[in-house]
Structures are given as C-alpha cells and as structure tokens.
C-alpha cells in the first residue's frame, strides 16, 4: 500500500500543476454540464405536465361554460313561460271580472225579489239555475 502511495506521490510531482488545474477545471465543467442537462430535462418534464394540466383545465372550463350557457337558456325559457302564464292569468281575471259585471245585476235582482214572485220550479231546473255563475 505504501508503494502505491509513493508512486502516486511521484506521479503528482511528475505532472505539472497547470495540467492538474486543467484536469480539475474539465472535471468541474463536465459535472456542471451534466447537472445542467439533468435540470433542463426535469424542467421540460414539468413543462409538459403543466401543458397537460392546462389542456385539462381548458376542457373542464369549456364543459362548465357549455353547461352554464345551457342553464341560462333554460332559465330564459322558464322566464318567458312564466311571463306568458302571468299574462294569461291577467287576461282570465279580466274575463272573469267582465262576466261578474254582466251577471251581478241578475243575481242581485233574483236575491232581492219578493217571495210572492217565487214559484215552484222543478228541482233539477232549480239546481241548474243556482249552479250558474
């Protein structure tokens, strides 16, 4: 073992300092390049993953927007139907008020008529007349 160390010591003395310095610089640069290439590969992998995540997020966003637009269309249709229903209800109430105005004097006259003007009527006919609006 000692002889190996002595030979190594002799080798160290035989090779000039500038050669050892150049070898150290080449080794350091080679290590730096390897480290840099490894980092670049890792960053490329991260970039690829980020691009895929972006595509997925865009697809999810587009799907959500399509659902939101569909729900908006449905809501607008429901609003239109509701407005049409309210209009129909107002028209029906107006028609009922008109009918009530037409029949109210007849009902009042029948209710205020004296009992002497009341004559026997067939029960079926009486019930039909009383059922009229």
Image (cartoon, helix red, strand yellow):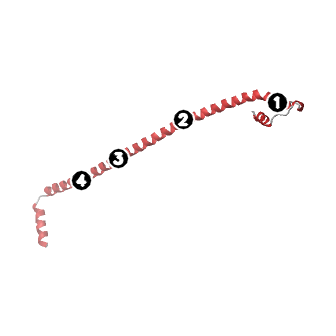
Q: Which mark is nearer the camera, 4 or 3?
A: 3
Q: CA distance from mark 4 to mark 1?
A: 109 Å
Q: Earlier in the sequence, mark 4 or mark 1?
A: 4
Q: CA distance from mark 1 to mark 3?
A: 82 Å
Give the percent coordinates (x, y) of residue 111.
84, 32
Q: Residues within 10 Å of mark 2 (few under 14, many from 20)?
A: few
The residue under label 2 is: 77
Q: Residues within 10 Å of mark 3 (few under 14, many from 20)?
A: few
Q: Which mark is nearer the camera, 4 or 2?
A: 2
Question: Which residue is painted at 80% across and 30% down in the image?
Answer: 107
Left or right for 98, reference 108? left
The residue under label 1 is: 108
Q: Nearer the viewer, residue 116 or 53?
A: 116
Q: Nearer the viewer, residue 45 or 19?
A: 45
Q: Secondary structure at mark 2?
A: helix
Q: Earlier in the sequence, mark 1 or mark 3?
A: 3
Q: Earlier in the sequence, mark 4 or mark 2?
A: 4
Q: Earlier in the sequence, mark 1 or mark 2?
A: 2
The residue under label 4 is: 32
Q: Earlier in the sequence, mark 3 or mark 2?
A: 3
Label 4 close to label 3 by CB (< 8 Å): no
Give the percent coordinates (x, y) of residue 57.
40, 45
Label 3 close to label 2 by CB (< 8 Å): no
Label 4 close to label 2 by CB (< 8 Å): no
| Residue positioned most to the bottom | 1
């Amino acid at each position: 073992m000692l002889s190996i160390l002595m030979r190594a010591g002799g080798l160290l003395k035989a090779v000039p300092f500038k050669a050892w310095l150049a070898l150290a610089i080449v080794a350091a640069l080679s290590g730096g390049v390897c480290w840099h290439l490894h980092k670049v590969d890792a960053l490329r992998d991260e970039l690829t993953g980020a691009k895929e995540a972006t595509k997925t997020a865009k697809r999810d966003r587009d799907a959500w927007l399509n659902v939101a637009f569909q729900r908006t269309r449905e809501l607008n249709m429901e609003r239109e139907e509701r407005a049409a229903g309210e209009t129909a209800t107002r028209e029906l109430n107006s028609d009922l008020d008109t009918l009530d105005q037409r029949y109210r004097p007849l009902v009042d006259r029948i209710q205020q008529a004296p009992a002497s003007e009341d004559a026997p009527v067939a029960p079926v006919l009486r019930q039909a007349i009383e059922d009229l609006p």
